[in-house]
Amino acid sequence: MNPDALRGHMDALLLSVLEREPLHGYAIIEALQERSGGALNVPTGTVYPALRRLERIGYLSSEWATVGGRKRRTYRLTDSGRKQLQGERSAWREFTSVIGSVLRAEATALR
Amino acid sequence: MNPDALRGHMDALLLSVLEREPLHGYAIIEALQERSGGALNVPTGTVYPALRRLERIGYLSSEWATVGGRKRRTYRLTDSGRKQLQGERSAWREFTSVIGSVLRAEATALR
DNA sequence: AGTCTACATGTAGGCTGTCTATATGTAGGT
DNA sequence: ACCTACATATAGACAGCCTACATGTAGACT
C-alpha cells in the first residue's frame, strides 16, 4: 500500500477502529491489520503521533493503565470524535465517488 | 475536497484524463472539473509541476503548440504511462477496498 | 485608451502528515 | 544470555499538494 495514499485518511481509520471500544496504540495497529486482512501495516511512528494529534484536537481522550506489568495508554472516542467519524465516513464516500468518476470515465464516455 | 485526500492519487487522475486524447494543462484542469461534476478544483500550482514530474518519469511526453496566438504545452500518454494507468486503476480498487473494509467494519462486525 | 475576464504556463516556498530509524523498557520463553 | 512479543515515544527525512505570485496573449466592453 502506497504510504501517500493513506494521507488524509488516517484519521478516519483510527476513529473507526475506536468506535466500538477503547484501545491502546499497539492494539489499534493490530486491529487495523486484522480488519484490512493484513493489507494495512501502519508503523508505530505513524500511529502514536497521529493519536496524540487527534487527542489534541479533541476527538480522543486517553488514560494510562498497567496490564501485566506493561503500561498502556488507552484512547477512547469523545463525543466530538464520534461526530467527526460520521463526517469522515461521508467524506470518504464522496471522495471515492469523485475519484472513481474520473478514473472510470473512459469506460462510460464512449458508450 | 480535503487537499490531503488527493495525495497519491493525482497521478491516476492525470493519466486517466489523458487516456482518450492528448490535452494541455489548462484543459486537463477543466476536464477534471467536468468529469468530477465540479468537485475537483485542482490549482495550477498542483497540476503543472505534477505534469512535469510525470514527464520526467516517462509516463507522459509533451510538445508545444500555438493555438489562437496562445502557447500550449500538450501532454500525451506514453506506452509506459498507459501501462502505469492500468496499475493505478488496480491500486485504486485495492485502496478503496482496504480502507472501506476498515471504515465499514462496525456495520458488519456485530452481525 | 484603459480595464476586465478568460486563457495559458510556470516557480518559490510553506505546510503537514507519513515514514524510517532509533531509543527505552517489561515479560516470558529457550 | 538471548530472542521475541508487547508497548510507547521522538527526531528528522521526505514528498507532494497548496498558496501566492509572476508573466503574457486575446477579446470584450466602456
Image (tube, coloured by chain):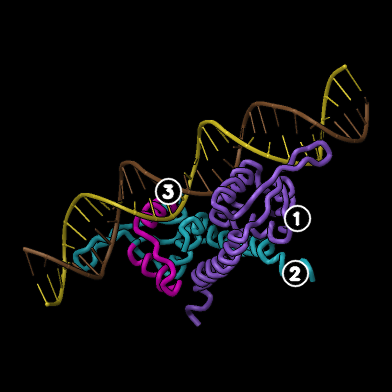
Chain colours: A cyan, B purple, C yellow, D brown
Where residue C20 appears, as percent x and y from the top left, is 34, 54
Asked whether residue B80 appears in the rendered view, the answer is: yes
- Which residue occupies the foreground of this view, A99 or B81? B81
Looking at the rendered image, the disc whose residue lies closer to the viewer, 3 or 2, is: 2
Specify whether residue A47 is painted magenta. yes
Q: Amino acid at mark 1?
A: Glu
Q: What secondary structure prevails in the magenta region?
A: helix
Q: Quadrant of residue A88?
A: bottom right
Q: Chain of mark 2?
A: A
Any mark on residue A56, and which? 3
Q: Chain of mark 1?
A: B
- Circles 3 and 2: CB atoms closer than 8 Å: no
- Residue B72 vs C11, above or below: the answer is below
Please report the residue visible at 34 percent of the width from the left and 67 percent of the height from the top. Answer: A27
Q: Provide the residue span drawn in magenta.
A: A26-54
Q: Residue at x 41, y 53 (%)?
A: A50
Q: Are marks 2 and 1 in contact (CB under 8 Å)?
A: no
The residue labelled by disc 2 is A108
Element assignment for label 2: helix
How far apart in space, not on screen, are marks 2 and 1 (Cα)?
14 Å
The residue that disc 1 covers is B34
Pointers 1 and 3 in contact (C-beta within 8 Å): no
Q: Nearer the viewer, residue B93 or B60?
A: B60
